[in-house]
Image (cartoon, rainbow, N blue to C red):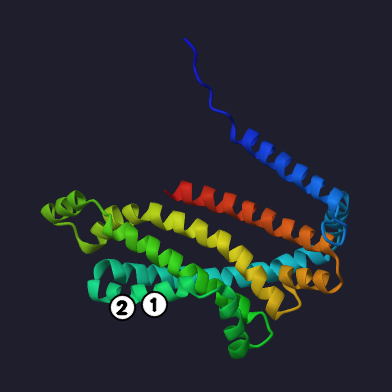
Amino acid sequence: MKTNKEIPKSIYSLVSGLIVLSVWKLLTVYFPPLVVPTISSVINSLLVIFTGAQLYQMIMVTMVRLIIGLTIGVAAGFVVGVFMGHFKFFKGIAMPIIGLFQTIPPVSWVVLALVWFGFNGKPAIFIVVTSAMPIIAINVYEGIINIDSRLLQMAKLYRFSEWKRLHHIVLPSVASYFNSGFRVALGSSWKIAVMGEVFTTSDGIGGMIKLARLNVEPENIIAWSIVVVMLFYVSDYLIGKILIKEG
């Protein structure tokens, strides 16, 4: 009897990588290096970045901004989501506001943040908050309204205390929604934090990308972008392990 073996994820990743590299190589044939830098030039830029002391300093600057913004956004989103899940009146008021946060382009938030905070990196923190908050709020809200009513009836029947009800029913039910929302927020926060730095400061990873743009060094722009992608995958992997372990 034949069995269908599942293809390992690493094979899919390898194929995807080969496709990207093939398309990239093809583009370098038809476009000059200032438009599409060669693969070798980007690799050389990565080697320079990883062997220099500046890399870890810039990563720390960006990570601090991302962590601050993500912490504020997640905390605010969690509170808003809980209130929306428990109070219809609050949900009716909050949902249109969350819709505004989701539809206003990040660039608009950056421009406003520049007026409010100046060119000091704080706008990068602010736009991470505006990005993470609605994602977490909606996911927490969805988790609360989808709690199994039979579990709530059981808790009422056995006269669970509010703490016991929260600990054994509400939080486990919301956890999967929150975890999904958090990982989405983490991914969007990396690119938004770096974008905010490009527009508002000269340090951090975004500052390095801006410097590469001013010096017309597309290979460095791509190299630093690859660093951001790598950092996202590392942080997503670590967060995924922590969330799975806690779950």
Residue 178 in view here: yes
User: Which residue appears at 63% of the width and 52% of the height?
Assistant: 233
User: Residue 150 versus residue 53: which sits nearer the camera?
Assistant: 150
At label 2, which amino acid type do we have?
A: Ile
Give me the C-alpha separation between circle 2 and circle 1. 7 Å
**How dense is the environment of label 2, judged by Cα within 10 Å: few (below 14), some, or many (20 and up)?**
few
Q: Which mark is residue 174?
A: none
Numbered disc 1: secondary structure: helix
**Residue 215 pos. (x, y %):** 87, 72
Q: Which mark is residue 93?
A: 2
Residue 72 in view here: no
Q: Up-down: is 82 above or below 37?
A: below
Q: Residue furthest left?
A: 157
Q: Is residue 73 left or right of residue 79?
A: right
Which of the 4 image quarters holds residue 218? bottom right
Q: Up-down: is 178 above or below 87?
A: above
